[in-house]
């Protein structure tokens, strides 16, 4: 199988100038720290970073395949109830590998997939109005089992299912993905007898896409999860090398750190030149932001670290954002997701007489135009001294997407070593959760609620 490649030519000083691009000497200086960072990450594979071993979890994928086969053809819809790392990967895999119109016209025997990753009542309420829960399989995903958003969704849809199908009948419409032993959802599984899958220890939410968190919904809608894992395994083998020039994860991690720490570019733009890959930008945004965005270093000193991820889609955002990117502040660097061979070609017809200004388009393919637009953006960025790298997908398939997922997960883990932060905790997210629990009146959070109310006791100012 062909490999996903990382082309960093346009991030070099030779391409965009020494003020904005990295020199070969700068990159060479990062070789030893990068190797040490990789050793530090890989040494934790059997301890607390078990996501590194997910590509080799053949038995788990076998159970997922068996379950998907057992329910094939029984449901019109699959609904994922989850948020953050329990949702973004599911959406990215679905749109990349099943395409933008799957839900409008699903292939025979395959259900539609909806990822309800919010508690906005307009979102949940409208789904309830439009779709029949009795023809739906609900995959509830929460490692802790205590996620307020997911559990509120579960309570709503469980009640609806019981109303329509009864206590016994509703159970076949729920499958739970949660911790093996702990948490409310595991208790629910044991009490109700729901089918269930496990989020393994050492697999945090944003690193869980290659676990049952992301693979179950994918298998249910026809994604080849074995090819996905094979791609991830192939990238894992490539990224075992401690030689910077041979390891794309090390190069990408080093570039991200250098672009912020040395070139003053705190904004990282993922520019997907593929409609199918657009939601990989959202998945990566969480991976980067939650992993590297930290107030304190591993030593406990305040550092306020972290780049700001931004997602853009080509060619759509050439007409909405590229003006800023080319002529605005020099505070961004770019990652272009490029597909070398699209699955389809569409030919532009001959130009009618009298429209000679469009002759250059007649008889050409949309793929050729799309590639020219992409390459034109790369040229414009380079000539404006805006550094970029390109992630080159041979084509969009499960194998190449699996490669990309593992590449970015490992790169972000290595970034944590460069930034000297814990890439695997999320105290800022937890602070917001605690505040929400307090505001909802959850038992045990009374003091926090009182503090919030006292802090906000002044008169509101509105215009």
Image (spheres, rainbow, N blue to C red):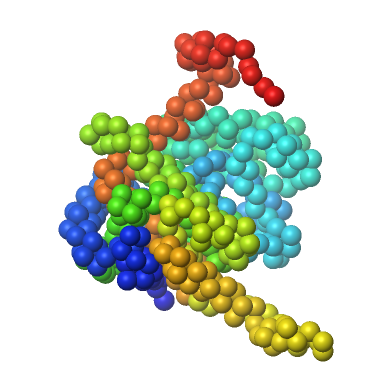
Q: Position of residue 407 (x, y in %)?
A: 38, 60
Q: Position of residue 153 (x, y in %)?
A: 63, 34
Q: Nearer the viewer, residue 327 or 75?
A: 327
Q: Position of residue 191 (x, y in %)?
A: 54, 30
Q: For this view, does 116 lie left or right of residue 376?
A: right
Picture quarter with the C terminus: top right
Q: Position of residue 116 (x, y in %)?
A: 63, 43
Rendered residue at 42%/32% (across/down): 428
Rendered residue at 68%/55% (across/down): 112
Residue 221 visible at all: no
Note whether 325 is above or below 115 in the view shown: below
Rendered residue at 63%/62% (across/down): 319
The quarter holding residue 57 reads bottom left
The quarter holding residue 111 reads bottom right
Q: Nearer the viewer, residue 197 or 386?
A: 386
Rendered residue at 64%/35% (across/down): 119
Picture quarter with the N terminus: bottom left
């Amino acid at each position: 199988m062909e490999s996903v490649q990382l082309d960093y030519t346009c991030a070099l000083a030779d391409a965009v100038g020494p003020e904005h691009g990295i020199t070969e000497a700068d990159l060479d200086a990062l070789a030893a720290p990068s190797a040490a960072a990789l050793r530090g990450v890989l040494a934790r594979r059997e301890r607390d970073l078990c996501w590194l071993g997910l590509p080799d979890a053949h038995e788990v994928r076998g159970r997922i395949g068996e379950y998907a086969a057992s329910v094939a053809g029984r449901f019109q819809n699959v609904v994922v109830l989850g948020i953050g790392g329990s949702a973004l990967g599911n959406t990215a895999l679905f749109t990349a590998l099943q395409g933008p119109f799957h839900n409008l016209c699903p292939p025979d025997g395959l259900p539609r997939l909806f990822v309800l990753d919010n508690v906005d009542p307009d979102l949940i309420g409208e789904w309830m109005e439009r779709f029949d829960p009795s023809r739906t399989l609900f995959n509830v995903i929460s490692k802790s089992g205590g996620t307020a958003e997911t559990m509120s969704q579960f309570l709503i849809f469980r009640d609806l299912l019981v109303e329509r199908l009864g206590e016994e009948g509703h159970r076949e419409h729920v499958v739970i993905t949660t911790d093996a032993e702990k948490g409310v959802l595991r208790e629910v599984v044991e009490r109700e007898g729901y089918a269930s899958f496990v989020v393994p220890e050492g697999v945090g939410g944003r690193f869980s896409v290659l676990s049952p968190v992301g693979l179950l919904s994918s298998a249910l809608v026809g994604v080849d999860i074995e090819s996905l894992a094979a791609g991830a395994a192939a990238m894992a083998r490539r990224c075992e090398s401690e030689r910077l020039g041979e390891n794309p994860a090390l190069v990408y991690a080093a570039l991200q750190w250098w672009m912020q720490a040395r070139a003053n570019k705190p904004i990282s733009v993922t520019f997907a030149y593929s409609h199918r890959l657009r939601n990989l930008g959202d998945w990566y945004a969480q991976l980067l932001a939650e992993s590297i965005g930290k107030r304190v270093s591993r030593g406990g000193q305040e550092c306020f670290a972290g780049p700001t991820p931004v997602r853009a889609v080509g060619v759509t955002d050439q007409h909405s954002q590229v003006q800023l990117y080319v002529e605005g502040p020099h505070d961004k660097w770019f990652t272009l997701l490029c597909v070398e061979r699209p699955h389809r070609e569409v030919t532009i017809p001959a130009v009618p007489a009298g429209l000679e200004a469009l002759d250059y388009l007649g008889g050409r393919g949309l793929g050729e135009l799309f590639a020219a637009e992409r390459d034109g953006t790369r040229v414009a960025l380079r000539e404006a001294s805006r550094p970029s790298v390109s992630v080159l997908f041979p084509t969009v398939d499960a194998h190449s997407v699996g490669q990309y997922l593992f590449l970015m997960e490992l790169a972000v883990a290595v970034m944590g070593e460069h930034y000297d932060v814990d890439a695997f905790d999320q105290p800022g997210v937890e602070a917001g959760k605690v505040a929400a629990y307090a505001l909802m009146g959850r038992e045990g959070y009374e003091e926090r609620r009182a503090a919030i109310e006292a802090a906000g006791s002044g008169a509101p100012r509105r215009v």
